[in-house]
Structure formats: C-alpha cells, structure tokens
Image (cartoon, rainbow, N blue to C red):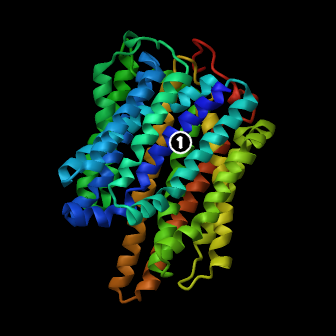
C-alpha cells in the first residue's frame, strides 16, 4: 500500500510541474496589465521557467544517483514551493521572472528523479506497467487541464493564485514524501563528481532551450549562432564523459538500443503531439472563431481518450504484447490523426473534421507509457536517476522543438499567403495544414526508428533494476 501512496505523491509532484508549464499562458494578458510587461518581455514569464527546467534535468537526475533520489526530490519541491510563493507575491516584472527561473530549477530537481524512484519501487512487470500507466495518465491530465485551471483561477480570483495554489499542494507533497518515499544513500559524489562535465551539459542544454524557445522572436541568424554554441558545449560534454575518470553521465547508458531508441522516438513523437495541442487550439480560435471555453470543451475528448487509454488499457497491452508493439500501434494512430488534420477546411464541422482526430489522438495513451517502459528498461540501480533525467530531458527537447519549429512553419506559410492577398482564414488554414503535414512526417520517422532500432517485444522491458546492475553493451 505504501508503494501506491508513494506513486500518488510522485504523480502529484509531476502534475504540479506539468500544470505550471501551461497554467501561466492564459493569465499572460492579466499579468502584462498588472505588472507593466512590454509585449516583447512578456514571453519571459514562460521562457524563464522552461530554460532552467530543460537545462537542469540531466544534471539533477545524475545528482539523484549520487546523493540519493529522495533527497533531490525533496530539495526540488522545497525550491518549487518557495519560488511559487515568491511568484504569487511578485509586484514587478523582474521579480516574477526571477521567481519563474527558480520554479523551473525546482521542477527540474523534483521531476528528474521521479521515474528513477518509480522503477526501483515497482520491479514486478505487471505492477510496473500499471504504475507507469497511472503516471502517464497524470501527465496527460496535467497537460490538458492546465489552461482550464489557469483561466478559472484568473477569472474567479486573480493571476496571483495560479502560483499560490502550488503552495499547499507542494507542502502536502513534501510531508508525505518524507514518510513514504524509499530512502537510499546514493553512490556518493566521488562516483561522478565531474564539475567540468556539469558546467558543459548545463550550459549547453540551457542555451539549447533558450535557442529553441526564442526562434520566433530573434529570427534565424541569432538562433543559428546560439544553437551552434549549444551544440559545441554538448559535444564537449560528451567528449569529456568519454575521457573523465568519474564521468557525470557514464556513456554506457547509450549502449542499450531500447534506451537510446526510446529517447530518439520520444523527441520526434512529443514534437508532433505537443505542437498538435497548441496548433489545434489556435486553429479553432483564429479560424473557426471558438472562444477559450469552447476550445477547451472541444479538446476534452482528446484528454479523456489519452487519459483513459493510458490508465485502463496501456498496462494490459504492454504486458501482453510488449512495449515495442504497443508503441508502434500508438504511433500509427497518432500519424493517422495528424494526417486527418492535413485536410482541415476553413469552415470545419466539429463532428466530421475534428472529433475523429480527438479520438485517434488516444494513441498518445499507448505511446507515452510504452516509451517510459522502454526508456527506463535497462536502467540499473546506480543509473536510474540518470536514465530518468535523460528521459525527461529528451521529452522537454521534443516539446520545445515541436512548438517552435511547427509554429514558425505555420506562421511563415500564412504570412506568405497574406502578403499575396489571400484572405486571412484561408492563409491561416494553409499554414496549419503545413504544420500538421510536417507533424505527420515526424511520426512516420518515429515509427521507422522504433521499428528498426528497438528490440522485439519481451518482458525485459518491464524488468526491475537490480542493485549494481549496469546497462548492457
């Protein structure tokens, strides 16, 4: 019973993290009005959270292996709660941006080790599959209800409460985590105290996230420069890991085809799925004229479908057919959903043009748990935090890349058509169609990678880590 209570604590922490990534978006106009943000600076209320969150995940996951995952989880939640209180009390743009940066850092610490804790608690295949299904359901629910909750709190109270609400939830999570999460000493800092490696990977990932989230604002030239510097830092990190006596990230983690393949597939699949969530909402509002509430209700079937499949179906299918087979089936459904969207008209009928997409997107409820099983499949006791941090890092990279690149493609196509005199609804629709076509292509590539790289389905993907077990070569 205590393990399932621990799973509830881990899921609650992840729910806060996912909610906080989206709940702010609907409150941006109110925040701009109250604090006097300029239009150019307003995006930093989002970016200031994403940059440390994406940049610190890998380092935080490895710290969990070295000093204890429970300690890192608790430290992250303490930072997150304190930063949420500071954000709610913010009375200036600078203070809010600083608080959001701290929130991102706290989220990175807490969420980076969650999967590492989960796979060491649930070692029996069927139980682990159920636990991952519950965990994936939490992620799907958080991504779906964040904007709704943000709108309700902002309208009923004010924008400060989108941050204050984290405080009681976070405190309850900390108190329960102290009691129910398993404690471990960790391997010790001497097993991976690579300061140079830490600087390189953190700097490279932060600069990489900064590059991606700022593509639309800064344009191609500056983004290419910062992106090139980020790649150089990351290349230096991998070179350092290959030669360091006590590497921060032992490269043996990439020897597993399932771990490496699952992370690549995740980048491609999440780029398409997260961009879908943003772009479909924009299409319904800017082309079809839906309001915020109508858009949320229109997307509710997708949330229910993903959540229901991940919670009630995915575990059984993973246990019966193996994670690889389930992943391939889910990718087919997602590709079909994106393919359906490539034909959306200017005057769409919800039942015939959009509802089938909302149901097909249930494939995400198969993809996410299967990827989690595969991404953590060969993580040993000493590497579970690292594998968890790596998995969460590629998740954030995929989401950020998808939104930045596909939004830019849609806007560019629409802008070209508007410049040629095309009516705005038609131009916007053509832009969205292009983005959905590219998203479908990403999912096809993800299917090919999964089919060719990942190992055939077996129970090894659900096997629990053993003490001292290493990723096989």
User: Nearest the camera: 351 or 451?
Assistant: 351
x 68%, y 46%: residue: 327
User: Nearest the camera: 164 or 384?
Assistant: 164
Image quadrant holding the N terminus, namely top right
Is 93 on the left-hand or right-hand side of 305? left
- Residue 331 visible, this orientation: no
Above or below, 170 relative to 125? below
- The image quadrant that residue 273 belongs to is bottom right
x 64%, y 37%: residue: 132
Is 314 on the left-hand or right-hand side of 240? right
Above or below, 343 relative to 252? below
Residue 134 image position (x, y, % from top left): 65, 41
- The image quadrant that residue 106 belongs to is top left
Residue 19 image position (x, y, % from top left): 46, 50
For the residue carrying disc 1, how many other residues have a C-alpha within 10 Å: few (<14), some (14-19), or many (20+)?
Answer: many
x 53%, y 74%: residue: 294
- Residue 348 visible, this orientation: yes
User: Nearest the camera: 201 or 158?
Assistant: 158
User: Quick one: SS at disc 1?
Assistant: helix
Above or below, 189 relative to 334? above
Image quadrant holding the C terminus, namely top right
Above or below, 107 relative to 46? above
Is 151 on the left-hand or right-hand side of 370? left
Determine which residue is flagged by label 1: 264
Q: Residue furthest right?
A: 320
x 60%, y 64%: residue: 300
Residue 437 image position (x, y, % from top left): 54, 67
Q: How many marks do you count on the picture?
A: 1
Residue 295 image position (x, y, % from top left): 52, 71
User: Nearest the camera: 158 or 100?
Assistant: 158
């Amino acid at each position: 019973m205590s393990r399932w209570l621990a799973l509830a604590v881990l899921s609650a922490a992840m729910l806060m993290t996912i909610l906080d990534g989206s709940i702010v978006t609907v409150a941006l106009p109110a925040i701009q009005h109250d604090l006097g943000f300029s239009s150019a600076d307003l995006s930093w209320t989002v970016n200031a959270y994403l940059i440390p969150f994406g940049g610190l995940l890998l380092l935080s996951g490895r710290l969990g292996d070295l000093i204890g995952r429970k300690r890192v989880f608790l430290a992250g939640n303490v930072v997150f709660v304190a930063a949420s209180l500071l954000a709610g009390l913010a009375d200036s743009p600078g203070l809010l941006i600083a608080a959001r940066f701290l929130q991102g850092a706290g989220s990175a610490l807490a969420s980076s080790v969650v999967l590492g804790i989960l796979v060491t608690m649930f070692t029996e295949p069927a139980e682990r599959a159920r636990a991952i299904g519950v965990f994936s359901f939490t992620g799907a629910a958080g991504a779906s209800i964040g904007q709704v909750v943000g709108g309700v709190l902002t309208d009923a109270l004010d924008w400060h409460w989108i941050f204050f609400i984290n405080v009681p939830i976070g405190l309850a999570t900390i108190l329960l985590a102290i009691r129910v999460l398993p404690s471990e000493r960790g391997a010790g800092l001497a097993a991976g105290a690579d300061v140079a490696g830490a600087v390189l990977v953190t700097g490279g990932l932060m600069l990489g996230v900064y590059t991606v989230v700022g593509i639309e604002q800064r344009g191609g030239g500056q983004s290419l420069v910062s992106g090139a510097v980020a790649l150089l830092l990351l290349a230096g990190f991998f070179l350092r890991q290959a030669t360091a006596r006590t590497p921060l990230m032992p490269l043996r983690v990439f020897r597993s085809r399932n771990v490496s393949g699952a992370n690549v597939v995740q980048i491609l699949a999440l780029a398409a799925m997260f961009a879908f969530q943003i772009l479909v909402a924009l299409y319904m509002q800017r082309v079809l004229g839906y309001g915020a509430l109508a858009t949320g209700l229109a997307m509710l079937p997708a949330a229910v479908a993903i959540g229901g499949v991940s919670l009630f179906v995915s575990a059984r299918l993973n246990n019966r057919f193996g994670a690889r087979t389930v992943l391939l089936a889910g990718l087919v459904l997602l590709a079909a959903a994106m393919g359906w969207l490539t034909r959306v008209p200017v005057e769409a009928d919800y039942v015939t043009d959009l509802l089938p997409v909302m149901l097909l997107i249930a494939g995400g409820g198969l993809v996410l748990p299967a990827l989690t099983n595969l991404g953590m499949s060969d993580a040993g006791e000493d590497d579970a935090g690292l594998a968890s941090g790596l998995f969460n890092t590629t998740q954030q990279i995929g989401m950020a890349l998808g939104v930045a690149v596909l939004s830019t493609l849609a806007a560019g196509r629409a802008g070209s058509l508007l410049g040629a005199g095309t009516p705005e609804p038609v131009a916007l629709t053509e832009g969205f169609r292009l983005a959905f076509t590219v998203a479908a292509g990403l999912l096809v590539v993800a299917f090919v990678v999964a089919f060719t790289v990942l190992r055939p389905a077996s129970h090894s993907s659900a096997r629990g880590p053993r003490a001292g077990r290493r990723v096989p070569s």
